[in-house]
């Protein structure tokens, strides 16, 4: 019987951009994934709450970005849950929902380098495999060698994926909007228009003390 393979793309997506979409699409094709499920985070444990746009806006932007790809889906699992969203809890829920599926968590190499700092990292690695998509500025080769040596139990569960690297980040997009610089072609046009319509990122969310 065919084993179904599901890709999970978690992130803050503030906003979603073409770097996320290219990584997800290449992972889908390279690892024969049946679907990629995008799960925008609720309250991210690693980011200051006031720094991040409202979950419903980030969710809507992901919806707009993936609308035309039948292999991409959107999940409100994290944004509907109260409290901090830890990846391990999300993965436990997904494991229960799809006990027979092979699950792959797609991350950029920046996030991959940090997985052992995540809460219950060892547990996470038993629940799901990882696909680390190349991200400019974050070389994973030393990390992968180290993991092989220090965590032999994870052998074959952490994969590296070369993608046409896009040096795009949400941080840069937010900064561009704030400074009146162009963001066109860095992200889907529908998301660019949404940002414009809602006046997102025009001002830094954290008040700058020098201006008070
Ligand atoms: P921020 O700058 O706010 O941290 P980001 O661009 O890093 O935003 P996130 O929402 O933090 O986007 O990232 C979600 C996931 O997508 C992470 O695993 C991250 O590594 C990955 N990712 C983000 N941008 C890229 C990119 N350009 N290429 C490959 N992977 C990426
Ligand atoms: Mg990031």
Image: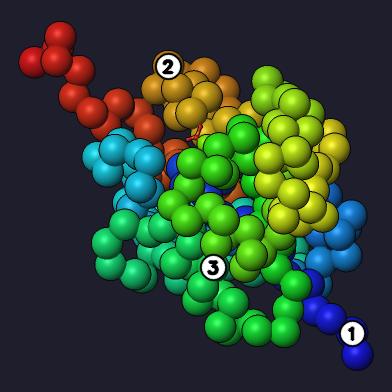
User: Closer to the observer: label 2 or label 3?
Assistant: 3
Marks 1 and 3, the one that precedes in the sequence: 1
**Disc 2: which residue:** 179
Is the C-beta separation of discs 1 and 2 under 8 Å? Answer: no
Farthest residue toward the top? 210
Q: Are marks 1 and 3 in contact (CB under 8 Å)?
A: no
Q: Residue at x 89, y 84 (%)?
A: 2
Using a 10 Å C-alpha cutoff, classify the residue at mark 1 as few (fewer than 14 neighbours), some (14 to 19) or many (20 or more).
few
Separation (CA) of disc 1 from disc 2 = 50 Å
| Residue at screen point 33% across, 53% down | 43
Q: SS for tag 2?
A: loop
Q: Nearer the viewer, residue 155 or 177?
A: 155
Indicate which disc residue 137 carries: none
Name the mark nearer the viewer: 1 or 2.
1
Q: Secondary structure at mark 1?
A: loop
Q: Please give left or right for residue 113 compared with residue 28 in the image.
A: left
Alpha-carbon span between mark 1 and mark 3: 22 Å
Q: Is residue 64 above or below residue 143?
A: below
Residue 153, x across and y down, in percent:
72, 55
| Residue highlighted by disc 3 | 91
Frontmost residue, 158 versus 206: 158
Taking the image as shown, residue 192 lies to the left or right of residue 52, namely right
What residue is at 75 percent from the left and 38 percent from the top?
149
């Amino acid at each position: 019987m065919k084993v179904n393979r599901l890709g999970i793309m978690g992130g803050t997506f503030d906003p979603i951009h073409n770097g996320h979409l290219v990584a997800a699409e290449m992972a889908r094709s390279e690892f024969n994934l049946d679907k990629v499920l995008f799960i925008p985070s609720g309250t991210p444990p690693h980011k200051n709450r006031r720094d991040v746009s409202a979950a419903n806006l980030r969710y809507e932007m992901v919806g707009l970005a993936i609308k035309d790809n039948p292999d991409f889906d959107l999940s409100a699992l994290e944004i509907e849950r109260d409290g901090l969203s830890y990846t391990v809890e999300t993965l436990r829920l997904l494991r229960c929902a799809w006990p027979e599926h092979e699950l792959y968590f797609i991350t950029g190499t920046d996030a991959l380098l940090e997985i052992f700092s995540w809460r219950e990292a060892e547990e996470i690695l038993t629940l799901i495999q990882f696909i680390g998509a190349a991200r400019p500025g974050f070389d994973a080769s030393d990390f992968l060698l180290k993991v092989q040596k220090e965590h032999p139990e994870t052998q074959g569960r952490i994969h590296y994926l070369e993608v046409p690297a896009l040096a795009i980040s949400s941080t840069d997009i937010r900064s561009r909007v704030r400074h009146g610089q162009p963001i066109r072609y860095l992200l889907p046009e529908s998301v660019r228009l949404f940002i414009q319509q809602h006046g997102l990122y025009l001002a830094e969310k954290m008040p700058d003390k020098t201006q008070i």
